[in-house]
Amino acid sequence: MSAGLWVLTILIGTFAVLNWIAAAADLRKVFAFTKIAVIALLIIWFGLLGGIEKRTIWFMLALLFSLAGDVLLLLSSHWFLYGLAAFLLALMAYIIGYNQTIPPLLPSVFGILLMAIPVFIIYRILRREVQSKPHLRKMAIPIIGYTIILWLMVLSTSMSLFKSEWQLQAALPAALGGVLFFCSDAMLAYDRFVKPFKRAHILVMMTYHLAHFALIWGVVQHFGLIS
């Protein structure tokens, strides 16, 4: 990498750590600034490596929609559904990007069958919570829809492990990134809609940032954008 890319890499890592510290210490202004800075710098880093090429543009769009979602979720609760929509578009962009080649049939079918398990669990949890918290009723359908798309993204990234054109050093971070993204959103939803838990804020942000790093690193490795 060039010196400029190394500087950007260090800045991304530094702002990510500062964001986690701010999340743990409840430093809201520092948290807001660093949250936006991490993804914004990652967009620049990826763009300099070739993120706006035809073969990588979907991954760039995923980052851009994620940045929009970050900004919207920093606003008042009235913007929550708009933030959810932005992240839904980010997930769909990742799905398209990771399915530019057709995944093998058998692992795909098995993965789709497995998808029913987390969706059913989340449906049962939401159904129980809606009964005790009527204000969540309008959120049930959007959350279920988001969960399905989220799991399709996890499936899409995991299928990289079974594609012959994906080498292991690219497929492993891609699959890990999908799982981390799911963990981040699952913890966020549980903390927000079910029961707040200790260290939720920092755990959500750590898994969120590591998910994006892994997803994009897998793409960079797959397309040979870095030497």
Image (cartoon, rainbow, N blue to C red):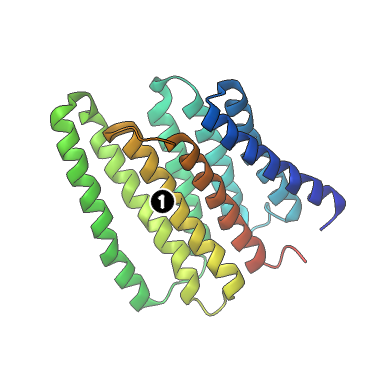
Q: Dot 1: within a 10 Å radius of its alpha carbon, few (fewer than 14), some, or many (20 or more) residues? A: many
Please, is residue 223 above or below residue 72 in the view?
below
Viewport quadrant of the C terminus:
bottom right
The residue wearing badge 1 is: 182
Residue reaching furthest right? 3
Residue 13 x %, y %: 68, 45
Question: For this rendering, which residue is in front, 147 or 208?
Answer: 208
Quarter of the rendering containing residue 132:
top left
Q: Amino acid at mark 1?
A: Phe
Quarter of the rendering containing residue 129:
top left
Residue 87 visible in rendering: yes
Q: Is residue 52 left or right of residue 3?
A: left
Q: Is residue 209 left or right of residue 112?
A: right
* Residue drawn at the location 34% of the way across and 38% of the way down: 189
Residue 209 x %, y %: 56, 45
Please, is residue 109 above or below residue 49 in the view?
below
Residue 14 x %, y %: 70, 40
Question: For this rendering, which residue is in front, 128 or 97?
Answer: 128
Quarter of the rendering containing residue 134:
top left
Residue reaching furthest left? 131
Q: Is residue 143 left or right of residue 3?
A: left
Residue 128 x %, y %: 15, 38
Label 1 SS: helix
Residue 55 visible in rendering: no
Question: For this rendering, which residue is in front, 191 or 110?
Answer: 191
Q: Is residue 44 left or right of residue 141?
A: right
* Residue drawn at the location 58% of the way across and 41% of the way down: 64
